[in-house]
Image (cartoon, rainbow, N blue to C red):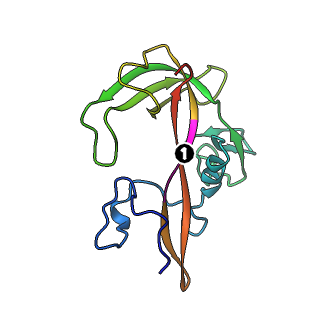
Amino acid sequence: MAELKSCQIVGTPYLEGKYCAVMDMWPLEAPELNRIYPFYDNLKQGRWTTTKCKKCGYVSYPPGVTCPNCWSDELEWIDLPQTAKVVALNEMAGPPTGFKAPLIQAWLGFDQSHPLKHLFVRIINCESGQVKVGDEVRFVSFEVDAHPIDVKKDTKICERYYYAFEPVNK
């Protein structure tokens, strides 16, 4: 079995050096395990994307493999807005395992011309009380620890990325 680059998988305990997949809070991002892996490839490039139906034009988020409006599988990847306004805010002083205090989450509002109107998301790179309702925040992608997967008779280490938002004025 291939060795992990790091023994600190956020939110996942190590048991005698073994990886415990059922305790992993991050998505499986490999093409072998996930049909929306282009979403994660785009995150790696710093792009926040979703799928748009080529037949009816419906934009769905989170991205999918079929259109929830007309059931077509003819989809294309489109970029989502990089900034939003904070509509509501929640700061958790005692966050779950794997997160540092304070865990800041926000209900974001996007420009009304875009199909994605609202999103509940994590806010990072700021201190408690730094973000307020009405503030502008921007998309940011970040690397999370690698994940070992078995592919045929080999073990592959998959890089993984996820996203959050951060204050525009830090």
Q: Is residue 16 above or below residue 88?
A: below
Q: Is residue 136 left or right of residue 76?
A: left
Q: Categorize mark 1 by other alpha carbons within 10 Å: few (<14), some (14-19), many (20+).
A: few
Q: Nearer the viewer, residue 140 or 16?
A: 16
Q: Which residue is mark 1?
A: 142
Horizontal and vertical percent for residue 91?
A: 32, 27
Q: Is residue 43 left or right of residue 164?
A: right
Quarter location, residue 101 = top left
Q: Nearer the viewer, residue 77 or 57?
A: 77
Instruction: Tell me which residue sits at (49%, 25%) in the image.
Output: 108
Counting every numbered tag in the picture gives: 1
Q: Is residue 120 above or below residue 35?
A: above
Chief secondary structure of the magenta span? strand
**Mark 1 residue type:** Phe
Report the magenta residues as a range.
140-145
Farthest residue to the right: give it.
54
Instruction: Tell me which residue sits at (55%, 19%) in the image.
Output: 169
Farthest residue to the bottom: give it.
153
Q: Is residue 9 left or right of residue 68?
A: left
Horizontal and vertical percent for residue 3?
A: 47, 74
